[in-house]
Image: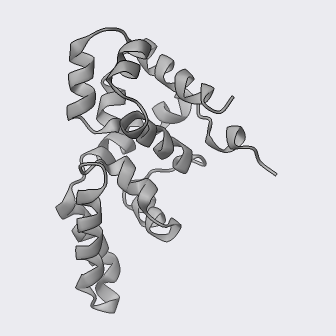
Amino acid sequence: MFTLKELYTIDIDQLLEIESALLKFSECDKNDIRQIWSDHSEALEDSYMSDHMANRFEKAGLSDPAIFFVSCDPANQMILTETYSLRSEKIYALMMFFQYIKCSLGTYHIKQILGNDNYIVISWTRSTSIDFFFGLSADQQTKLVNHYNETYD
């Protein structure tokens, strides 16, 4: 049996290994999501699913792709991992990390972990969680990953 710590802790190398795929994924928008599900639903001639997923994307954390990913069921997560080449054994844990950045931290936490820099706070509020993370310095990225992992201690 696995513990939560074993399932959800991550390391910086896992993120850096698929950085380019994550950054590509972070650029997706409602229209991309609609097209992805339209392509997968074509055999069924079902436009409902593509519209449904596009609307879910728009509602998921102000269109943050990582939050959308976590909100999907495993079959739909697989569609996203295949489309964006998000190849990692711990892809769900990595997406949980990005969701944590956007949904579990507040301005106070961002300043406490990364320093009292208003630019960082503005970037955190305006960027997707993936863009925010990869826009940080290597030292700041490590601090954020360590802080996240400490939640499972």
Q: Say which quadrant the C terminus sits in.
A: top right
Residue at (38, 50) in percent of width and height:
67
Residue 66, image x, y percentages:
38, 48
Q: Is residue 24 left or right of residue 69?
A: left
Residue 9, image x, y percentages:
62, 35
Nearer to me, 89 or 7: 7
Nearer to me, 73 or 106: 106
Residue at (31, 55) in percent of width and height:
60
Q: Is residue 53 left or right of residue 5?
A: left
Residue 68, image x, y percentages:
36, 55
Q: Which residue lies most toward the top here?
A: 116
Exactly how many numbered labels are in the figure?
Answer: 0
Q: Is residue 99 left or right of residue 28?
A: right
Residue at (35, 15) in percent of width and height:
111
Instruction: Specify how the rendered protein is coloured.
Output: one colour
Q: Is residue 110 left or right of residue 128?
A: right
Instruction: Please say if 9 is above or below 116.
Output: below
Residue at (39, 40) in percent of width and height:
103
Res 115 → quadrant = top left
Q: Which residue lies most toward the left here?
A: 31
Instruction: Please say if 28 is above or below 98.
Output: below
Residue 105, image x, y percentages:
40, 30
